[in-house]
Amino acid sequence: MAELRNRLYLATIGAGAPELAREYGLGLELDEFCTAANFDEHFDEWDARARSAMRMSDRFVFHAPFAELSPCAIDPMIRRAVRFRLDQAAGLCDRYGIARMVVHSGFMPRVYFDEWFVEQSAKFFREFLAGRPDSFELLIENVLDADPVCLRDMVEAIGDRRAGVCLDVGHAHVASKAPVREWLRVLAPNLRHVHAHDNDGSFDAHLPPGEGTIGFPKLFGEIAALAPAATVTFECPDAQDCVRRLIRDGVL
């Protein structure tokens, strides 16, 4: 797993993640602004936390806010709110010197038809990317998405080399009937980043790899084979437990 080790990140939702990133030479995915209100309430405090974490590593991904933010929203006022929040996030990326930003796809089953989701999301993200620098990288993550095809089609419809996929294997295991390996196969050509955490298929528990039924560490080998440049963030509340398991499995 040596070829994967240099592409591993810890999410800062995990207790002790910055210190562990420094100890093991890992990257960090900054989650301090996943909640949009943190831009408005106590911004200085959250900004200080993010900057403190950044002193512990030399490579970063920024996770944008996501709750109730659907780029393909039917109501144009909601779409304007989504654009406002993602512009805020991208502006903070600029200030931090971070080029890679994760956003949620915003798909909601039984609300959006697949055709609408693909067409309207692609339109939104094309417009969003028009104002971003060439070095910017948009990583679009599945959450409630029922299959990988719509996400693949949406990224291809965006038609911008700066747009790629963030495959969240835990979300796919819960929300989709398609096996995680099928998600990986379909999305591999556009796969830039992976969120790794485990569950038993019934609830998005964000367990350390190996505590659920997804099938780590074999999955890491499949990621390395199908998307050899993809980076991986471990999104677990207990970062120390996650690191212990990665050492046990020979990933670290």
Image (cartoon, rainbow, N blue to C red):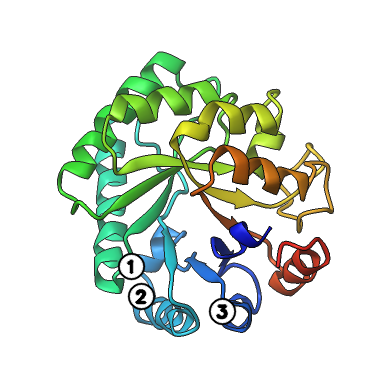
In depth, the one of 73 and 211 nearer the eye is 211
- From mark 2 to mark 1, how far is it between C-alphas? 6 Å
Q: Position of residue 105 (x, y in %)?
A: 44, 37
- The amino acid type found where label 3 is placed reads Pro
Going from N to C along the chain, the mark reached first, 1 or 3, is: 3
Residue at 56% across / 79% down in the picture?
18
User: Is residue 4 visible in the rendered structure shown here?
Assistant: yes
Q: Position of residue 142 (x, y in %)?
A: 53, 37
Q: Which residue is mark 3?
A: 18
User: Is residue 74 visible in the rendered structure shown here?
Assistant: no
Q: Which residue is mark 1?
A: 40
Q: Secondary structure at mark 2?
A: helix
Q: Locate the C terminus by quadrant.
A: bottom right
Q: Residues within 10 Å of mark 1 (few under 14, many from 20)?
A: few
- The amino acid type found where label 1 is placed reads Asp
Q: Position of residue 119 (x, y in %)?
A: 32, 20
Q: Secondary structure at mark 3?
A: helix
